[in-house]
Amino acid sequence: MLPKRFDQAKPFVTLGIIVLAWLIVPTGVKRFMRLSFFEFQAPLDTAAATARDVQDFWSLRTRPRDELIEAGIDLAHLNAKYETSIQARSALEGEVSRLEELLKLPSYTEYRSEPARVMRRDFNGWWQTMTIRKGRNYDIPKGAPVIFVGGVVGKISEVYAYTSEVVLISNPGLRLAATIEGDTRPLGFQGGNNPTFGPAKGTVEFVPLDVTATPTAPRRLVTSGLGGVFPPGLTIGQIVRLDPSTDGLFKSGEVKLDPRLDSIAEVTVLVPLRSE
Amino acid sequence: MTRTTFIIFGCCLVLWVCVSQLNHYLAPLHVSLFTGGLLIAFSALRLGFREGWWASILIGLLIDSSSAVSFGFHALLFAVVHVVVFNLRGRVPREETAFGLLVALVANLALFFAITVVLIHRAPEPLSMIPRLLIDLLASETTVFLVAPWFFALQERTLEIGGVSLRREQRGLL
């Protein structure tokens, strides 16, 4: 029989053995376990998201017919506006291709747009992620950029069978190359603080000293296209404050992100098209 | 892993899904709930070491699978807290719901603090995160306080339905 003192320490010894064993478990096994656990609980989230959609559908059914007719008319106006934009875009695309050919420039990466519903949001103080209802079944690749009407949402961090996980730009760990609208000099953006009851914020660094931004005269921060993940020109947020950094060589400051980012229900995944 | 482990894991899964849905709705307010302490309090106080420990590990791995942390992070923290609570439980009235509630609150606080210490370096301005984390902690502790009695009863009743009697086990009849 083991002495009483050892009996008391037995749980700690077991814990130590399990921790050591976990450290030497191959990464492939851990990855397989992670996928298995995620896929195990994914149907629960999908069921909850579907229930929410059904709820929304029935609440919309209670709306009066006049309201729907008005919404239809508004939508027709919007469609007409978008038709004009599509025509203008085609003309611009043709112009870009012509210039690329003329100047022998490399082409921009082309993307396929894949709209997806948001299934679950997980915005805590430590990380900000969301799960969308499309995954390997729609050929969503890991690292693909995710956008919405207000600009950049984030990028795909994990792809599962029927769902994908998106890391938001408000996530403290996410960094991307940015630039100020109308300027070509690259800056560094990092997701930052997400205060309670307030819009998400990020930080910007390596801003040239001649650039200024204040809450009354903010500057629009857009993606630079460097790094190859995000196409250039997508809105990240508004720079509302810039202060000289400690080294005095650059400025760093605060970026206010789109407040709609927190209640977003539909996003678009930009799936890069493989060149032939 | 026995039937008891899976029953407790199932109960924890129910709570975790409910909290995830709550967090989904609270996201626009930038408030988030964390109830990790509640997930392990019952199994650490009332079950045998192996059964409760495996349940804590399994639920930790489940949370890890959909979190932006290394796989095994929550599982390791849950295992450590489980071992500590299990070792101390002989000196306290562990069958009392009020004491279980206290343990859940303290364990939740400890886990929240540990996660914050490990992950705070990710933020560009760590100090500016403190007000947000304090509000999250307050909301989480309030949730644990309100939900714990129901959750303990749920686990106890589910075990009874599953043919596991905690009272008989504790008296050494099984």
Image (spheres, rainbow, N blue to C red):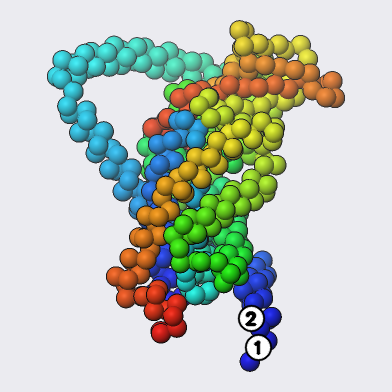
Q: Which mark is residue B118?
A: none
For mark 2, what is the residue? A7
**Residue B151 location, x and y as percent?**
39, 56
Which residue is located at x 19 percent, y 19 percent?
A: A68
Which class describes the residues within 10 Å of circle 2: few (<14), some (14-19), or many (20+)? few
Between the residue at mark 1 and the residue at mark 2, the CA separation in whole angstroms equals 7 Å
Disc 1 + disc 2, Cβ < 8 Å: yes
Q: Is A64 situated left or right of B16 in this image?
A: left
Which residue is located at x 64 percent, y 35 percent?
A: B130
Nearer to the camera, B65 or A6: A6
Task: Look at the picture and state if A161 lies above or below A17.
Answer: above
Task: Look at the picture and state if A160 lies above or below B131.
Answer: below
For the question of whether residue B16 can be seen, the reply is: yes
When asked about the image quadrant of residue A74, the answer is top left
When asked about the image quadrant of residue B91, the answer is bottom right
**Residue A83 location, x and y as percent?**
34, 15
Q: Is A89 situated left or right of A182 in this image?
A: left
**Residue B23 location, x and y as percent?**
44, 41
Residue reaching furthest to the top: A216
The kind of residue on which mark 1 rests is Leu
Which image quarter holds the N terminus of chain A? bottom right
Q: Is A66 situated left or right of B109 in this image?
A: left
**Residue B39 location, x and y as percent?**
47, 57
For mark 1, what is the residue? A2
Instruction: Please state the chain letter of the residue tagged with numbered disc 1 in the rendered image.
Output: A
Callout 1: helix, strand or loop? loop
State how many labels appear: 2
Q: Earlier in the sequence, mark 1 or mark 2?
A: 1
Which residue is located at x 51 percent, y 66 percent?
A: B93
Task: Look at the picture and state if A93 lies above or below A137.
Answer: above
